[in-house]
Amino acid sequence: MRLRKLTFIPVLSLLLASIEPASAAKVLYRYKNNEGVIVLGVSIPKEFQKNGYEILNIKGRVLETIPPALTEEEKADLRQQRRDDRVAKRRKEEQDKIDRQLLRMYSHPDDVIKALTRKLRDMSGVKQLKQGTISSLRSELQDIQEDAAERERSGKTIPEKLLTKMDDIEIEIQSLKSEIEKQEKIMESIRQDYLDDINRVEFLTRKNPTLPIPEIP
């Protein structure tokens, strides 16, 4: 290390001495030319600036290092990285807002479980009412079908009004069944949302749930 230091100082001194004193330069520029040779001068040609260079004071101390100019690919990567950073920042801000709202509503994962239980119970009540209506309609339909069958056995014509009534009841039953299926999907989606909230509140509060998570009735 000492030998390298001793050889470097005379070389740098010679380079500095080769610069015309009349220029009274306050800073020097060190860069590589097209042949890869290190050049020290009071200015730097424009064609070499893109390769990067160093700015030194008149005593040879580095004041600033200018990195090489970015390639088009590097510029594109940098733009993409900046876009990704903005998206990540926006997502974090949105998540922070959601977290603050969650903590205002729930102080423990069990609070979320209780809310889920109430929600499923209320929706289940509506579902049971529809199921009860379906049972009533089926009983009514069965009575009408038996009446129609008795008329056929007696050789009587089934009134058009009776046939229409049976069709209407069957359509209403299918409609209610479709509503129940949609409601069950909604209940499953809501349950999953609450499960996400339970996990998030558990993470934010560092508290473990103690209540069982309800299933869809």
Image (tube, helix red, strand yellow):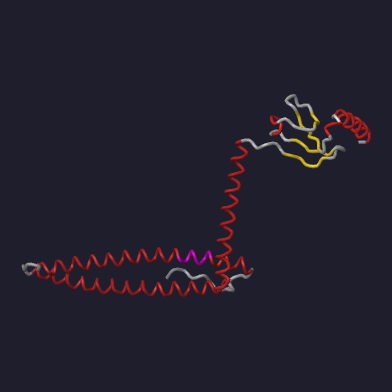
Q: Tell me where residue 91 sits by quadrant.
A: bottom right
Q: Tell me where residue 197 sits by quadrant.
A: bottom right
- x and y percentages locating residue 16 in the rendered image: 87, 32
Helix, strand or loop: magenta stretch: helix
In the depicted structure, whether residue 147 falls above or below residue 7:
below
- Tell me the residue at 21%/73% (across/down): 140
Q: 107 and 70: which one is in front?
A: 70
- x and y percentages locating residue 44 in the rendered image: 75, 32
- Tell me the residue at 78%/42% (across/down): 64
Which residue reaches farthest front? 22
- x and y percentages locating residue 127 in the rendered image: 36, 71
Q: Quadrant of the C terminus?
A: bottom left
Q: Is residue 16 left or right of residue 80?
A: right
Indicate whether residue 173 is drawn in magenta: no
Give the tally of numbered discs.
0
- Tell me the residue at 78%/26% (across/down): 37
Q: Quadrant of the N terminus?
A: top right
In the depicted structure, whether residue 62 falls above or below residue 148:
above
Q: 207 and 24: which one is in front?
A: 24
- Tell me the residue at 52%/65% (across/down): 195
Q: 10 and 102: which one is in front?
A: 10
Q: 168 and 140: which one is in front?
A: 168
Q: What segment carries the magenta color?
A: 190-196
